[in-house]
Structures are given as structure tokens and as C-alpha cells.
Amino acid sequence: MKVIKRDGRAVDYDRQKIKIAIEKANQEVSRKEKAGKEEINSIIEYIEELGKKRMLVEDIQDIIEEKLMEMEKFELAKKYIVYRYTRALVRKQNTTDESILGLIRKTNKELMEENSNKNAIIASTQRDLIAGEVSKDLTKRILLPEKITKAHEEGVLHFHDADYFLQPIFNCCLINIGDMLDNGTVMNGKLIESPKSFQVACTVTTQIIAAVASSQYGGQSVNLKHLGKYVRKSYNKFKKDLEEKYKGTLSDDVIEDIVQQRLKTEVAAGVQTMQYQINTLMTTNGQSPFVTLFLHLEKDDEYIEENAMIIEEVLRQRYQGIKNEKGVYVTPAFPKLIYVLDEHNCLKGGKYDYLTELAVKCSAKRMYPDYISAKKMRENYEGNVFSPMGCRSFLSPWKDKDGKYKFEGRFNQGVVSINLPQIGIIADKDEDKFWKLLDERLELCKEALMCRHYALLGTTSDVSPIHWRYGAIARLEAGEKIDPLLKNGYSTISLGYIGLYELTKLMKGVSHTTEEGHDFAIRVMKHLEETTNKWKKETGLGFGLYGTPAESLCYRFARIDKERFGSIEDITDKGYYTNSYHVDVREHIDAFSKLKFESEFQKLSSGGAISYVEIPNMSKNLKALRELVKFIYDNIQYAEFNTKSDYCHVCGFDGEIIINDYNEWECPNCGNKDHSKMNVTRRTCGYLGENFWNAGKTKEIKARVTHL
């Protein structure tokens, strides 16, 4: 029998749910009013003997009430009716009015600053945010089981991206850009044939990115190696045209020189097209595409020289930046760049070391690119090197029917993160209690993740043709279900985690950088990894452990726990938890040791992980930055750099950002007050509690504040 839920989903009938519901009511009545096991079973048997193939959940509940009344369990029936009525009221209660009106009135600060990639003042973006509030409301009241909603509200777990859960769309992906360029695609009902030149290929690529981004809520990654062949096409076209016109008039060397000059101009124009279109296009969800460009030179690639040209130009243009409305070159937020270090470019005398030298200069000025070590990645992923998705989660290795590894054209179904410090607070150094509570909450996370999976089941290819019909993910027929792509590990589904450092401090009294703390932290990580592997075997789904790059969640969990448990030294008093396995920012550890230490945790967090180090005044520490990049290749899979100097992303100012008379950070160059568009760091007295400022004449900041 199938049970039809209130949201229209058909689920398998489960007699255990009826038992649980009646037992909950049983707990609230006297012994003589309780329904015995035989009586409960008789109700269940009556429902099953009806022999119906489909039943509404409301009809089942009506029968339970009737049968309890027939048994003269009036008190019990009353409790059950009240429970149903209360749940109905909760489902019907509107919870969006204040949040939406606050957005329109610009008073809902939390919603307006939740996503730095969305300008919450612009009307088109507000439309998406309003829709998101409605989606969150329906998700909490109707779509999710009550215990999952409760766990989310209490900070037990975090159900990511509830503002998009209402629709059958997924998180992030690796666009199969090679297939779409080589074999053509369709956008807005129009056929886009394979490009004949590099510049056209760049234009088509950015149009694909925008279309893909409009029908999913996470990031998109594009491997630029697929554009190399289009540089070759442009080269052949230029050479053919010149030879037809000047053969016999100009020497071959002169023709070749002209061709190379034209090609260089073409590559620069194509890369500029990508950079400017990505930063000026607006997706239908009110933001720039959250896109990552993967810069990897594969030694056996037929087009390696062409791809080297592309990567060099990408780095040059990122180093230069993009002019803002004031005409000042600034660092664009997108596309994110990931540069792969391999044998031929790891600063050990390789042919392409010059590209890495340029990447280091670019990092010093613009903080991008991030770096992946091909050497370490091959160790961790069965010899493969591939891009993370836009959200920095990684796919698990998967082979097609021919036994070939496939990464592009795959995706992530969604994320649920667990609050580790909260478990440590409750366990209070009792390990038996900790492991028991951890397993209970992991099962809750699994149920929440299965909600994500079930929400996508039955989706047809027509929901997003660019994804399912025209190559970004697959080339299914019209109306065909995407279900096979959700199963057997083709797509992933991620368990995130926050606060391993704080958990270790709570349970062991020391950091996970100490010997005792490290042993405990590794046991926790292995248990999380083993649990996701167990889920994978049980369900056939691609569960993975994901070092969540969710800075806002670090603050949310800490805020909830402080309200619930009070101020706990070095835990809730800081106002944040450390992200995933990271070393706390206040630990006295050098950059090299930090990366080496965290590399062990990256290997266990195979569903995604990134480490970072902060370097003061990177532009003045180029030599140190270069040594760190060399170190990354041999020691850690994925790392990025942050700077400790002030920086305004609106105007490019890199002096000291001030605090004005209204207690706001303000760029003295352009007047920017948007925290999401500046880096601010100050350390004056070492105070690390709540941020405040001295009301005296100096107005000196008494906190270290880092806001990215």
C-alpha cells in the first residue's frame, strides 16, 4: 500500500508509524486509558485488511480516532485528536510575514546579509529572496518531518538551502562542458551548434553557465581544458585565411608570426568575454553565477600548449582585476579559480613553472587562485584529478559501464550538517554518552538527507532541459525521469560537520592539535566516515563526508548554543565555531604546520575539504607565498590563502578600514559599509569576546574582527 502524504508524495506504508503515534498519545494518559499492544495491533490489522492500494494519511488518522472511540478509549482518543489538531495548526500557521516585510523595509538584517552573492536591495533579487522565505516556511511546516524541523531550529543539525527545497532542483555540479561544446546544446528552445572559434566557444560557455546556474541553487564548475581545441580551431582558421591570401607573397615565418599575434588577441578577447559576462550576467535567482574555473594542465593532453595559453591569460586578467563603477580595478568575486599543481608546474624546474609563478603573484594581489595538489589528490581519489564543485564538495570516484572514471556531468543532491560541539556540551566529557548521542544524531541527519533524495525522485527531464536533456548533466528524452542519476553513487549526497576543534576541547580539555586531542578527533572523523560508508552500502546512494565550507553556519550553531547553554570559555564565548576539522584561528601554529596537520583530516573528509592559511600583507610576502605553494604540492590536497590586511572589494582599497561615528566599518576611499564586501582585521588588546568599541576619543577597536 502507498500512503499519500500532505505534500502529495506517495510513500510506502509503514505500520510502525501508527504504533509510534498511538504510543505517544499513550504516554499522556493514565494506565487504564492506555491502548494495549493487542488493541493497537487490531487497529493496524483493520487498516491493512481494507486492502487499499493507496490511502491518504488523513484517512488513516481518521480510522485511528474512530477505533479508539469504539474501544471506549475516550481520553486517549482526545489526546490523539488534540495532537493532530495542534500539528495542523502548526502547518497552517504563517511564519513568513515579518521576514518578508523586513526584507522589503530593509530591516531584516539576517536575511539581507545571508548571501553575499545577492544584493538584497535590487528588486529582482528580492523576488528570489521572497520566494525563498515561502519555500523555507513550507519546508519547515509541511515538507519535513517535525523532528527534522525541530532539530534544525535547535541547532542539532542544519538543513542547508531550505529556501530552494520546495522545487525539484539540486545543489552543485561539474558541467559536462566538453560534451555541450563538441556536440551542441539547446538554450531557450534554440539550437547552439559546436563553435568554430575560441571566442565563440567562450561566449557559449558563459551562456551555458548562466542557464545552468538558473536551475540549481549551488555552484557550477567548468574545466577549461575543453577550450583548448577551440584555440586550435582559431589557429587553423587564421592560418588558412592568411595562406590563401598571402601564400607566395609573405614567408611562412611571417605568416606564422601574424597568426600567433591574432591568436594571442583572440585568446585575450575570449577570456575577457568570460570574465565580464560571468560578472555581469544575472541568473534567474538574482545573483551572478557561482562558477569555478578549473585550471589543470594534463601532461597527455593533445591541446596542452593551447590550454597553457588560456590559463596564462586567465591569471593575467585576474591579476589586473575588473573596473568597478568608479573606474577602479577591483577583485571580482567570480569566477573562482582553482589552479592545479602537478609535476610540470610545482616550482621544481618544470616546463610550466612560469604559470605557477604568475598564479602566486595573482594570489598575493587578488587572493585567487586556490590550489590543488594533483599528487595528493591522486593518492586520495584512485589516481584521479578533478575539480571540486562550486560549493567545494567533491564527488566520489564512479565508473561508467565501460569501466571509465566519470566526473563531469555529475552533481550533489544536497547537504545536511551536524553540530559536533553541541553533542560535546551535552555529553560533558562522558565518552559513552557522547558516542551514543552522536549515533542518534547521525541517524537524524541520515533521515534529513533522505528527505533531499526523496524530493528529487520522480523529477522529469523537462524540469530543467539544460541539465537533463541538453548535456549539462545528461541527454535524456523529454519526460524521462532522472531517477537513475540519483542512485548507485552517480550523484553524491553530503553529511557536513562543524566544530571538531570545540568538540575535542569539550571532551578532552585540549585542542585536537595535541596528541590526546588528535587521537580523539581522528576517532570521531573515522566514525563519521564509516557511518557515511555504511549508509552508502545500505541505500546505494553516494553519501559522503563533507568538510562544510559554511562560515555563516559556524556563527549560527555557536549563537544557538550560547543562547541554550550560556557562555562557555573557548566554546560559545567566541561567537563562532571552527569550520569542520580546521585549527582554530587563535592556535599558535605556523602556516606550514597547519597545512600539514590538516591534510590528514582532508583524506578522511573525502566528500569535500579545503584548508586555508592567513598571511599578512601577501603582496609583500611573495617569497613566503611561493614556498607555501611548493609545500602544498607535496603535503595537502586543497588549500587557499587569506590575507590579514584590510581590503575593500568595492574599490580595491587596501589600507586601514575605519570605524565611523555610527559604529560601522567604512572604507575611507569609497565609503563602502557592506561587511560582505570587505576584509577587516584588527588586533589591539587581544580581547576576543563580543565586538565592542571604546566610546572615548580614540574610538579604538577592542577586538580582532575578520569578516569575509
Image: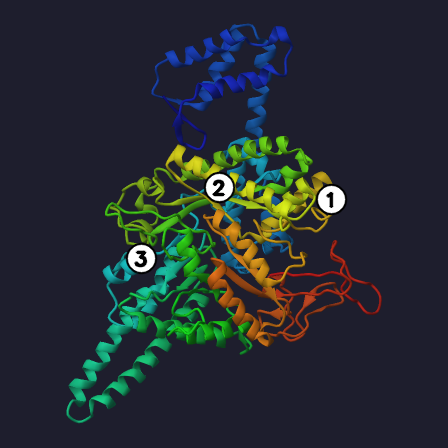
Q: Position of residue 693 (x, y in %)?
A: 78, 62
Q: Nearer the viewer, residue 342 or 213?
A: 342
Q: Position of residue 66 (x, y in %)?
A: 50, 11
Q: Dot 1: within a 10 Å radius of its alpha carbon, few (fewer than 14), some, or many (20 or more) residues?
A: few
Amino acid under disc 1: Ile
Which residue lies under the disc numbered 2? 529
Residue 294 is at least partly visible in this image: yes
Which residue lies under the disc numbered 3? 188
How much space separates mark 3 and mark 2, taking CA atoms? Answer: 42 Å
Which residue lies under the disc numbered 1? 568
Q: Position of residue 547 (x, y in %)?
A: 52, 49
Res. 258 image quadrant: bottom left
* Residue farthest along the right direction in this orientation: 696
Choose the circle earlier in sequence order: 1 or 2.
Answer: 2
Q: Dot 3: within a 10 Å radius of its alpha carbon, few (fewer than 14), some, or many (20 or more) residues?
A: few
SS for callout 1: loop
Q: Nearer the viewer, residue 682 or 205?
A: 682
Choose the circle earlier in sequence order: 3 or 2.
Answer: 3
Quick check: 633 above or below 502? below
